[in-house]
């Protein structure tokens, strides 16, 4: 087994200290927890800056912009197409820089333009696709021929009736009484079973995260033991 | 002007993007890709604004000596340090990776691991079979919790197959759970379409903010 | 008042109002001990995970799969074992992998995970796998990748032009990939379903945290996804299928015991509640 270095032990100890600081919140709020909490905010934001710059800004904007500018000032080639390409690189940068006008109250209204553009793209794209995927496809999956074994037919029936009754529960334009009330009631039962299933899985998820942290603490102890050997 | 131009932008580009889905022509596709790229680039600047706003909040806390202002020093110093390491040293920088792995990662992971304790406490203190509905929810939760892990097989493996916890939990997930979530998704799809249409047509204007001055 | 009723009435009330830190302690012990002393309980494979395994297993060496991974330190404990298992399956069969990390805080972890598992099988970067990295606004990025990977990712994570990578020759968008297996801890899964699958018809399977898993059975039923791997249990099933027991399979002992204890908490809590109500009544 590879010899564990002091540096590795110290880094693991930092991680373990921060892990235990957060766990200390279970006893009560304390300065160790607050310190770790504020540290993570700073580290996280600093990490974001580095990733945004290296992974996004350079490749998507700075590089095309400089390449476009170089092509424009270098003799040869079609001026119109080079200018067009350069101009296309400049526009989103201007849009992004306009966002910073939010910090200046007199001209903050300008920031609505890039926000409007972003909203337009997101809303325009979402409109047909969410409707198709979430609504039409799900409805299509409920309009299925009933066939096969008795259990398969029963299961399909429960899904179809459950879906219709669930939708009835959320339909508030009609009073929930009589047949409609009965359907809504059954719909709620189906919804409760769905939420119960989700809760069961949620417990699994949270315990998994705790297992991960305890494993890290065990690794820390192993690193110290490995160093001391 | 201050409200009309943004509304016009939303209308023109929103309608284009919605109809582009039905127009597979190459020119339409190229314009669509270019607009998507512009959105990503604008998004980068927006995220930087978020970080600048964070710095501003903590700087203000230090400046006016608000409660907990000492911790704000920690935030600002760690932000500047991590950003500096990443920007000037690159993302493969050893120190940057170590602070990520042994600083950022343990704290984030442990914050979420705390939820395991809270969910256990909530299960004990708040999960009551008071009504038919809460009993249904509780029963479904217990069956799925036991049925989806190996212990379900140990507890009920000796029973006939339809009565085994693993089979019942599979039934619950594939049948009533599917119906429940399908209901929700149909509603969500309609909701997203409605809100998108309202934004594009300028009916939904809360994103414009104040009085336009 | 009946003197004999008073002690038990106090007992049930005390039980309901117990300091929550005792509950935390019990959970802590119940999770910690089985990690140190594993039992080795058997794992059953479900059909939604089997479907993913079968589809990947049916591919020939040289096929390309897209495995976008969107998890971070907060959800790493659940999804990293899943990612490892799927990557091992792919690399062991000589299937090539294109990956992205569209969640900003997970970029470094995912890069390391790819490098680690690829090295286990001697797979070379640029020939056997490509990591595109991160770009913001996953929905828009997913849409653009459907047209051409090069539009949102002119360069990969390491700064190489995509056209300079041997594996990316002739690979332009989702139609060049046999399937997409999205490992995701965020609501971005919806973008993969709505944009990558619905718009571009890419065959899609998802690996999600257990919290999210129940939401996607509806999409399994409608065949919008062909497989679903839910949480650490799903990861354990996949480890069993590839015959490479790892962290997930070992965690199933802990999950079993912890779940049993929480069920006991629920039962005891309800008994205490109804008993104390009966006494008051």
Image: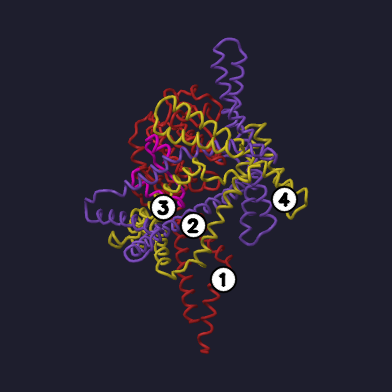
Residue bearing the label numbered 4: B71
Say what secondary structure mark 3 lies in.
helix
Residue bearing the label numbered 3: B184
Tint applied to chain B in the drawing:
yellow
Mark 1 belongs to chain: C
Q: Earlier in the sequence, mark 2 or mark 1?
A: 1
State the mark number for residue C18: 1
Tags 3 and 2 in contact by the CB under 8 Å rule? no
Q: Main secondary structure of the magenta part?
A: helix
* Position above or below: C265 against B210: below
Mark 3 or 1, which is nearer the eye? 3
Q: Earlier in the sequence, mark 4 or mark 3?
A: 4
Say what secondary structure mark 2 lies in.
helix
Give the chain letter for red: C
Residue bearing the label numbered 2: C34
Q: Which residues are magenta?
A: C194-223
**Residue C47 percent coordinates (x, y):** 33, 48
Quadrant in the picture for residue A61: top right
Say if residue C94 shows up in the picture.
Answer: no
Say what secondary structure mark 1 lies in.
loop
For the residue pair B71 and C90, the one nearer the viewer reads as B71
Say if residue A148 shows up in the picture.
Answer: yes
**Residue C131 percent coordinates (x, y):** 50, 32
Q: CA distance from mark 3 to mark 1?
A: 37 Å
């Amino acid at each position: 087994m590879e010899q564990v270095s002091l540096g590795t032990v110290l880094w693991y100890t930092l991680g373990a200290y921060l892990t235990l600081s957060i766990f200390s919140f279970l006893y009560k709020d304390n300065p160790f927890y607050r310190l770790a909490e504020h540290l993570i905010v700073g580290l996280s934001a600093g990490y974001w800056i580095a990733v945004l710059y290296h992974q996004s800004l350079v490749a998507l904007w700075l590089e095309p912009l400089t390449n476009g500018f170089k092509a424009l000032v270098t003799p040869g080639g079609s001026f119109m197409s080079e200018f067009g390409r350069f101009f296309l690189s400049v526009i989103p940068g201007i849009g992004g820089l306009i966002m910073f006008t939010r910090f200046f109250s007199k001209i903050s209204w300008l920031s609505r333009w890039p926000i409007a553009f972003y909203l337009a793209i997101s809303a325009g794209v979402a409109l047909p696709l969410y409707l198709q995927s979430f609504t039409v496809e799900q409805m299509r999956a409920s309009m299925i021929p009933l066939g096969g074994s008795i259990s398969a037919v029963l299961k399909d029936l429960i899904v179809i009736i459950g879906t219709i009754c669930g939708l009835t529960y959320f339909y508030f334009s009609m009073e929930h009484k009589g047949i409609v009330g009965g359907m809504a009631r059954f719909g709620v039962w189906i919804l409760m079973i769905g939420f119960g299933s989700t809760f069961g899985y949620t417990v699994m998820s949270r315990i998994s995260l705790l297992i991960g942290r305890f494993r890290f603490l065990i690794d820390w102890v192993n690193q110290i033991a490995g160093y001391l050997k | 002007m201050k409200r009309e131009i943004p509304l016009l932008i939303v209308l023109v580009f929103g309608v284009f993007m919605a109809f582009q889905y039905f127009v597979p022509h190459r020119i339409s596709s190229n314009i669509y890709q270019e607009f998507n790229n512009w959105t990503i680039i604008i998004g980068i600047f927006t995220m930087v604004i978020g970080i600048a706003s964070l710095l501003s909040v903590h700087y203000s806390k230090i400046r006016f000596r608000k409660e907990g202002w000492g911790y704000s020093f920690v935030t600002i110093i760690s932000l500047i340090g991590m950003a500096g390491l990443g920007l000037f040293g690159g993302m493969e920088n050893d120190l940057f990776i170590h602070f990520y792995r042994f600083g950022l990662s343990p704290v984030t992971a442990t914050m979420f691991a705390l939820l395991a304790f809270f969910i256990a406490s909530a299960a004990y203190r708040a999960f009551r079979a008071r009504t038919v509905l809460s009993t249904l929810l509780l029963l479904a939760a217990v069956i799925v919790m036991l049925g989806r892990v190996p212990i379900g097989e140990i507890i009920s493996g000796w029973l006939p197959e339809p009565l085994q916890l693993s089979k019942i939990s599979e039934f619950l997930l594939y049948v009533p759970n599917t119906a429940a979530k399908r209901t929700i998704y149909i509603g969500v799809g309609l909701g997203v379409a409605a809100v998108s249409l309202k934004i594009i047509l300028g009916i939904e204007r809360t994103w414009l903010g104040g009085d336009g001055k | 008042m009946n003197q004999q009723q008073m002690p038990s009435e106090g007992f049930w009330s005390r039980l309901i109002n117990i300091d929550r830190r005792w509950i935390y302690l019990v959970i802590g012990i119940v999770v910690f001990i089985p990690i140190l002393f594993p039992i080795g309980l058997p794992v059953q494979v479900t059909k939604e995970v089997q479907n993913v395994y079968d589809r990947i297993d049916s591919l020939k060496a040289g096929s390309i799969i897209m495995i976008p991974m969107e998890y971070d330190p907060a959800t790493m404990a659940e999804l990293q074992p899943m990612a490892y298992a799927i990557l091992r399956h792919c690399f062991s069969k000589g299937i090539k992998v294109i990956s992205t990390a569209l969640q900003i805080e997970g970029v470094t972890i995912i890069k390391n995970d790819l490098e680690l598992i690829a090295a286990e099988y001697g797979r070379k970067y640029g020939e056997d796998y490509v990591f595109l990295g991160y770009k913001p606004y996953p929905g828009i990025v997913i849409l653009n990748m459907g047209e051409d990977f090069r539009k949102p990712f002119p360069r990969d994570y390491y700064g190489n032009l995509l056209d300079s990578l041997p594996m990316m020759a002739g690979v332009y968008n989702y139609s060049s990939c046999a399937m997409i297996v999205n490992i995701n801890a965020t609501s971005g899964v919806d973008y993969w379903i709505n944009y990558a699958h619905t718009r571009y018809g890419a065959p899609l399977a998802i690996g999600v945290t257990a919290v999210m898993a129940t939401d996607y059975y509806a999409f399994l039923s409608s065949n919008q996804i062909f497989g679903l791997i839910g949480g650490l249990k799903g990861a354990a099933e996949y480890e069993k299928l590839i015959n490479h027991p790892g962290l997930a399979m070992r965690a199933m002992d802990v999950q079993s015991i912890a779940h049993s204890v929480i069920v006991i908490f629920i039962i005891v809590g309800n008994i205490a509640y109804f008993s104390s109500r009966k006494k008051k009544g």
